Image (cartoon, rainbow, N blue to C red):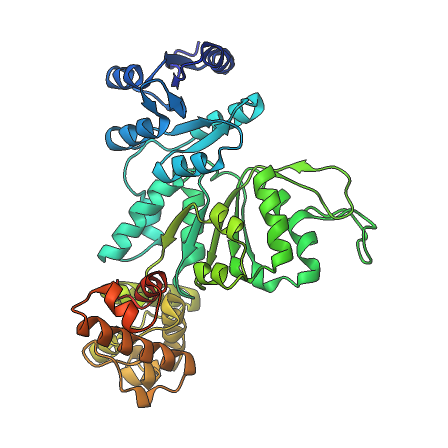
Amino acid sequence: MNTSPRQKILIVDDEPDIRELLEITLGRMKLETFSARNLGEAQALLQREHFDLCLTDMRLPDGTGLELVQHIQQRAPHLPVAMITAYGSLETAINALKAGAFDFLTKPVELPRLRELVSSALRLPTAGGPSTAIERRLLGDSPPMANLRKQIDKLARSQAPVYISGESGSGKELVARLIHEQGPRASQPFVPVNCGAIPSELMESEFFGHRKGSFTGAVEDKPGLFQAAHGGTLFLDEVADLPLSMQVKLLRAIQEKAVRSVGGQQETVVDVRILCATHKDLEAEVSAERFRQDLYYRLNVIELRVPSLRERRDDIEALAMHVLKRLAKDTGQPEARLHPQALEALKNYRFPGNVRELENVLERAHTLCENRTIEAQDLRLSEGNCTADGAMADLTQVDNLEDYLESVERKLILQALEETRWNRTAAAQRLSLSFRSMRYRLKKLGLD
């Protein structure tokens, strides 16, 4: 006989009919329900009982569902909260997700969607703090990495779309995988797609699938990426590279939670969480009308920035040791050691290619070094990206146009900040930049 206690759900709604519908539905799922008619009753119940999930209406007689989300975030941050909003109140739902809600439902409540949401929320891990899996795979003890791990742990407990920003090679896909693996969709597929690598004429077929005979070469039915990710996570890497025509179709698929394959007559319901990334400034792409603003707001509910390697130089030694251990294991050779001067050279290098470049540099040096000791010259670092005691290298040494321009940009921005006593608004005006553009450049250059 199963004597395990039933999981408890708190329902907060001032409409008796809605409360009764939710109580009956959840009762049939063998869940114990507690009901509150307003914010005050809900807060009193939260003091007395431990709950596994909270379902709350947005509008309450004595407050709002957002206030309840914030109350729970402060006192029980690992309790998932789902917001119930009026149909079409997308902005309200997005505000709830930003405040920390797990997910949202729209009225009238669709019972299959309700059961799906509840089941997903109850699969969340209960332990607090970043998991050992995050710490083991996302190396580094620097403050930026500690903060990143904390954010991943929080975002894994939500169904909100996340826009992961960061430079090329900084580990955006790894971050996306960790968000997926630490959340309730971990047992379902994680499907990464490089949006810039798909020919434009094949995009619709790749994303939504096609039916046999729908075009030349369609010799059989083929599911698309959305269907492959059903129940799991779809990671759209380099999403800024999507053509405008595809952006319209992607927006519709996200809004409707359904796709129609090329040549198909009926739509297929899909349940996917969307994570996306790009190394471009997505706000600037919107301003230049290369990226749809409405799609931007659907994808960028929460932004998670991955720090560059320049911003966490203290992690370089630990990362290098990890890479060298892996290389020794992969090649079956004794582990190489870094000469102190080689380590110092790595710490004084700008790493425009971030962690990916560090791995490539060490792999090459591992092959070239003598007596299993990597000397500074074995690293073959570009002089243009080397610094002395953390200072900028002489610009005349830079032999890469992109790096040269970034160096000039950094120098001019630092000069403007110093001349304005680090008043960012005044510095932006001096450089004829909008404040938003100035903020992006400071973030990109690691000066914020």
- Report whether 133 appears left or right of 26: left
Q: Give the position of the C terminus as an image quadrant.
A: bottom left
User: Percent x, y for residue 133?
Assistant: 35, 46
User: Residue at horizontal 27%, vertical 65%?
Assistant: 311
Figure check: 245 above or below 299: below
Q: Quadrant of residue 92?
A: top left
Figure check: 116 above or below 48: below
Frontmost residue, 89 versus 396? 89
**Residue reaching furthest bottom?**
396
**Residue reaching furthest left?**
421
User: Percent x, y for residue 224?
Assistant: 66, 48
User: Percent x, y for residue 444?
Assistant: 34, 65
Q: Give the position of the N terminus as an image quadrant.
A: top left
Figure check: 428 above or below 128: below
Residue 122 visible = no
Q: Quadrant of residue 184?
A: top left
User: Residue at horizontal 35%, vertical 36%?
Assistant: 100
Figure check: 446 above or below 130: below
Residue 206 visible = yes
User: Percent x, y for residue 408?
Assistant: 32, 80
- Report whether 402 appears left or right of 208: left
Number of marks drawn: 0
